[in-house]
Image: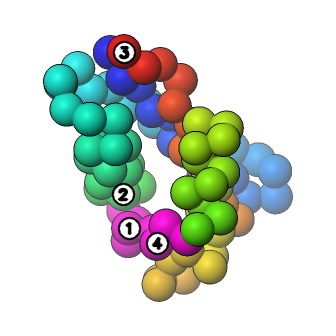
Amino acid sequence: MFRLWARTFRDNHLMQDTCIEDGSDDTRTHKVFRALDEVCIQFDLSRPVWLEKNIAEFKRHRKVRFGQDNFIDDIDFDYLELQVIEED
């Protein structure tokens, strides 16, 4: 089972969170992007842009933060954090 935890923070306070599960046999990358799409739907967000620093951070720590620089629209929180909490 693949599980991804998504959270938004403002002023170091948790605003909202969700956990997305994926039991498919797809690749890790596809699971991450599908989970991100689901998070964006649940939180009513535009999809963030992955910058090189985000990719490197995600590969290194299994966690990534998206701030205002990653979104085209204005966001009402400081950052969106994604963390892989379980992998097959």
Asked if the magenta segment contains residue 45, the reply would be: yes
Q: Which residue is mark 3?
A: 88
Q: Which residue is mark 1?
A: 47
Callout 2 crowding tier (Cα within 10 Å): few <14, some 14–19, many ≥20: some
Badge 2 or badge 1: first in the primary sequence: 2
Amino acid under disc 1: Arg
Circle 4 SS class: loop
The answer to whether residue 77 is visible is no
Distance (Cα) linking label 2 and label 1: 6 Å
Q: Which residue is mark 2?
A: 40
> CB atoms at circles 4 and 3 under 8 Å apart?
no
Residue at x 27% of width, y 44% of height: 30
Amino acid under disc 4: Val
Callout 1 crowding tier (Cα within 10 Å): few <14, some 14–19, many ≥20: some
Q: Which residue is mark 4?
A: 49
| For discs 3 and 2, the disc positioned in front in the rendered view | 3
Residue at x 54% of width, y 82% of height: 74
- Name the residue nearer the viewer: 31 or 17: 31
